[in-house]
Image (cartoon, rainbow, N blue to C red):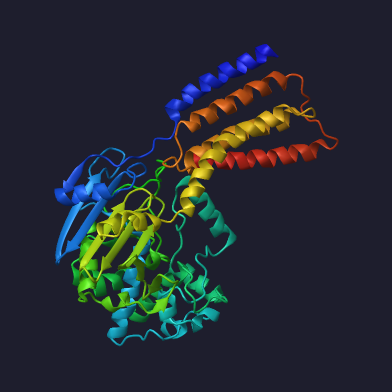
Amino acid sequence: MRRTVVSALVVALTASLVGAALMPRVPRLGVQTTGDPDLARTARAAVPDPKGHRGLAVALVENGRIRTAGLGDRDPDGRPVETRTAFEIGSVTKVLTGMLLADQAAAGVVRPDDRLGDTWPTVTGPARDVTLAELSSHRAGLPRLAAGSALGWARVLWSNVSGGNPYAGQDVHGVRNIADRATPGDGRGEVHYSNVGPSVLGQALAAKAGATYPDLLEARLLRPLGMTATVVATGADDLPADRAHGSRAGGRPSDPWWGAGYAAAGVGPWSTAEDLARLVAATLAGTAPGADAATARFRSDDDTRIGYGWFTTRHGDREIVWHNGGTGGFRSYVGFERATGRAVVVLANTDKGVEAVGLRLLGVAQEDAEAATPALPLWIGAGLAVAFTFVGGLSLFGTARRRELDRVTLLASTVWAFAYLGLGHRLGDWSLVPAWLWPLGAGLSAAAVALAATRWRALPAVDARVPWRRLLSVASSLCAAALAVAAVIA
């Protein structure tokens, strides 16, 4: 027994040392700086914690003057963030779609109270009765996300594990089908955040204009504002050549997102800090096409109201008009304060939130600014890191100590021990959890394998009254583990 324990400890120590070389490498905001040096210093001071960030592009509008700066790296190779570096902007696109609605309403093409079915006649389901204003303000009672089918949900799950694009293959036809099948819920008339609503709105406005959403956006908003670096990628060929590369805050690379169907909600648009500064400056001044979209019209909660896409929230004695965005490997924030005439843009190439940075640049108190960063997803990432790193080894220890045991069961538990370890490496947010915990998990799993190996020879191949049932159960478990491993190495 003592010999077994010593062997397990040696194996655990060796595995931990190997794991230390393989443990997650957490991005950290680099020291490189480009653009306006004063703004770069101010922005760096506004970052609560540089761990989990790789690079930031910021813009500040004061007295009608736009200043921009780049901080850190745009990719793991260490190339600096520059003024022309493009980032995925995610749901910031929803304000562009809301401004398209306001612009088309001002032009007399549509009215905000028009029904969806009158604007996009090919939509025939119950959602045809919601209004364009409801779609733009998240009050249409539509779900946050609809993948369209069981296969679509499987693709979303796989993408979350592998870091891929969950919206691949979602075209305009698919979004229209979702609109056909969607039934507005009991929450219609209340603000419930939805990616489906703005997507349907954007495609409806494009159909009414006889254009695609990217073309309508280019003609009515981007070109008049001189936003020449902003593009909507509906395929790999549309991706900007000079772009940042995204990753999770824990270091896992993420593929770019694109898909024509959800483009109006934030899947596929890329922009620069300078381009978005033109947008917020003109919206603040009231000269942007559809600037009236930023007018708060409907109440979301005690502190927040919403217009067409734009939120308005009170932070202490300051009232900020804003929107944020997030994709698999990027975060974004745009906001402005009418009272001071100041506007800000913050773009990041990891999925660590930047709301606090933007609010601090707008002059919001640090405590209020940090409270505005969404907390739940962060704790989920930390929990996944710890749970997956240790659950496999602990489970294998428990299995190896069972009296009634056979080889096929022990084999499945061993495979899962390392599958869980890989999932912890890929899915955990290691910017919140010490990365050295992962080598400890590797050592635990290796020690459990060593203990299991001491029992292997004495175990029967299959210990069950109905062997084929046990084999089927183990085979299905191994298939699931193989899928998890495939997602980890994808």
Q: Is any part of residue 264 visible from this angle?
A: yes
Judged left or right of residue 41, residue 21 is: right
Q: Residue drawn at (14%, 66%), measured in percent from left and top?
A: 63
Judged left or right of residue 169, residue 54 is: left
Q: Residue drawn at (28%, 85%), measured in percent from left and top?
A: 106
User: Which is more toward the observer, 187 or 200?
Assistant: 187
User: Which is more toward the observer, 59 or 467?
Assistant: 59
Q: Position of residue 53 (x, y in %)?
A: 33, 45
Q: Quadrant of the N terminus?
A: top right
In the rendered image, the vertical position of residue 243 relative to residue 437, given as above or below: below
Judged left or right of residue 359, residue 300 is: right
Q: Position of residue 311 (x, y in %)?
A: 36, 70
Q: Position of residue 457 (x, y in %)?
A: 73, 19
Q: Residue drawn at (46%, 49%), measured in percent from left and top?
A: 378
In the rendered image, the vertical position of residue 452 relative to residue 295, given as above or below: above
| Location of residue 125 by image quarter | bottom right
Q: Residue drawn at (66%, 11%), measured in percent from left and top?
A: 3
How many badges with numbers are in the image? 0
In the rendered image, the vertical position of residue 454 relative to residue 185, given as above or below: above
Q: Is any part of residue 236 visible from this angle?
A: no
